[in-house]
Image (cartoon, rainbow, N blue to C red):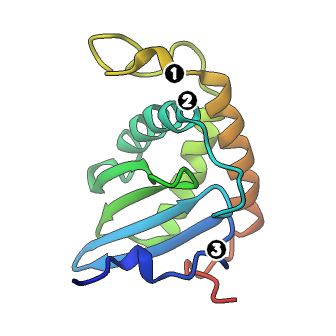
Amino acid sequence: MKRIASFEVDHRYITPGIYISRIDDDITTYDLRTRKPNCGDFMTDSIMHTFEHLFATYVRNSTIGSKVIYFGPMGCATGFYLLIRNAEHNETLTTVISVLEQIINHKGEVFGNSEIECGNYKSLHLESAVGEAKKYLSVLKAKLNTDFKYPTE
């Protein structure tokens, strides 16, 4: 059986950052890694869920919104996948940073915070998503000259 691309990356060397997971024709899958894998520091369901609601809404309303195919959490609770059509990598990075700043400055209810809009709306917690955005933003700002490649050692 063919292995999926994400299993081909040596997770022992991944650190928080932004990476290109794969490119399929005109679709780029970005790995938005917020945690070092397998170190016990995993996102809670509430963090992942709330961050997903906010990030997905803001990125779909950004200048690259029409190019966004998908945004969602990794099952391992160490990051998120962002799929973009016809991606310009530096534009994507700039947009991710802008979206994180919007999450940090978000006021009011979390988008989709109702029984009608969400299947687990009671698990949304704005402060946890803001904390995640602040932590991840500091990582990305320290790596502005990224080559988007996974570390190999």
Contact, mark 1 vs mark 2 (Cβ under 8 Å): yes
> Looking at the image, which is closer to me, 130 or 153?
153
Q: CA distance from mark 3 to mark 2?
A: 23 Å
Which residue position is annotated with label 2? Answer: 46
Mark closer to the chain start, 1 or 2: 2
Work out whether 80 lies above or below 37. Answer: above
Q: Residue furthest front?
A: 1
* Residue type at numbered disc 3: Ile
- Residue 22: which quarter of the image? bottom left
Work out whether 56 lies above or below 82. Answer: above
Dot 3 crowding, Cα within 10 Å, few <14, some 14–19, many 20+: some
Which residue position is annotated with label 1? Answer: 124
* Residue type at numbered disc 2: Ser
Mark closer to the chain start, 3 or 1: 3
- Left or right: 146 as drawn, with respect to 139: left
Quarter occupied by the C terminus:
bottom right
- Residue 132: which quarter of the image? top right
- Left or right: 131 as drawn, with respect to 68: right
Q: Secondary structure at mark 1?
A: loop
* Residue type at numbered disc 1: Leu
Quarter occupied by the N terminus:
bottom left
Dot 1 crowding, Cα within 10 Å, few <14, some 14–19, many 20+: many
> Looking at the image, which is closer to me, 152 or 1?
1
Residue 138 drawn at (x, y percent): 76, 53
Which residue position is annotated with label 3? Answer: 14
Mark closer to the chain start, 3 or 2: 3
Q: CA distance from mark 3 to mark 1?
A: 28 Å
What residue sits 64% from the left and 83% below the top?
A: 151
Work out whether 21 lies above or below 73. Answer: below
